Amino acid sequence: MIATNGVTARFLEQRGSPSIRRVVREPERWDRLVALAAQTGDRLPSSPDSRALADYLAARKAADPTHFADLSLTVIRLLGPGQYVVDPPGGDAPGHFGLAVKDYTHSTAPNRRYPDLLTQRLVKAALAKRPAPYSIDELGRLATHCTQQEDSANKVERQVRKSAAAMLVASRLGGRFEAVVTGASGKGTFVRVMSPPIEGKLVRGEQGLDVGDRLNVQLTHVDIDRGYIDFTRA
């Protein structure tokens, strides 16, 4: 799939066609990833390096498969979300940092994802040696729209999962769990419990914590309808 998407992006570029690229930019908090690697005796370069990150993750998966899911989630959160951008002919769109590739589009699932359908239409026009079916401005608006719709769909999915998780642990109020910090910002500090695998907000004792830190937490409140799961530091 990754190879196909890369080939498709380069094909459109070679034919002088615009494209919609799927990009994940260099992480703003690379220093935190460097610090997390150092905690396990590993080393990442001081500047963002996607191949070095991939090698580090492969090594940690082999060394500690039990906790790799937590590390992987932490890295994903620090990398930040992907987005769609338009790449005009001769352009230089950012690559996909998480996959360590420069040229990447979405093209393999036009039956379920609209950006793939747009890419297929661009490919069809290029093969037929016809002008692209969209102007650069139209593709730009479509790229923005697809990113926004994806974000909205992800919010709904997260809400459903949070409500299901709240229902799962509603009978375990007061219980203590091992957890890892998955988010720390102005919106609050969030932790993921290892067993059962659920995520909630740390409402007390969050001072000084950062993404990737491990701690023990106590479940203090759940709201199934709103999907709220609240923990305090134990």
Image (cartoon, rainbow, N blue to C red):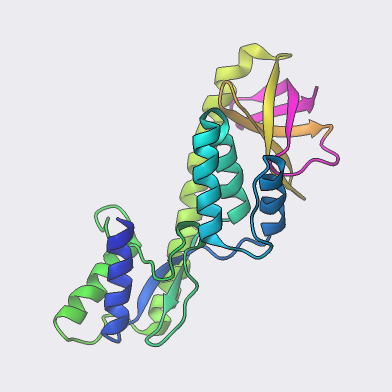
Q: Between 210 and 170, which is closer to the camera in this rendering? A: 210
Q: Which residues are magenta?
A: 206-234
Q: Is residue 16 left or right of residue 192?
A: left
Above or below, 138 relative to 232 = below
Above or below, 14 relative to 78 = below
Above or below, 138 relative to 200 = below
Above or below, 122 relative to 186 = below
Picture mark count: 0
Horizontal and vertical percent for residue 98? 50, 57
Residue at the image point whose x is 58% and y is 56% from the top: 80
Residue 16 in which image quadrant:
bottom left
Residue at the image point whose x is 26% and y is 76% from the top: 11
- Split into 4 quadrants, where in the image is the C terminus? top right
Q: Is residue 153 left or right of residue 233?
A: left
Residue 9 in which image quadrant:
bottom left
Residue 191 seen in the figure: yes
Horizontal and vertical percent for residue 127? 16, 79
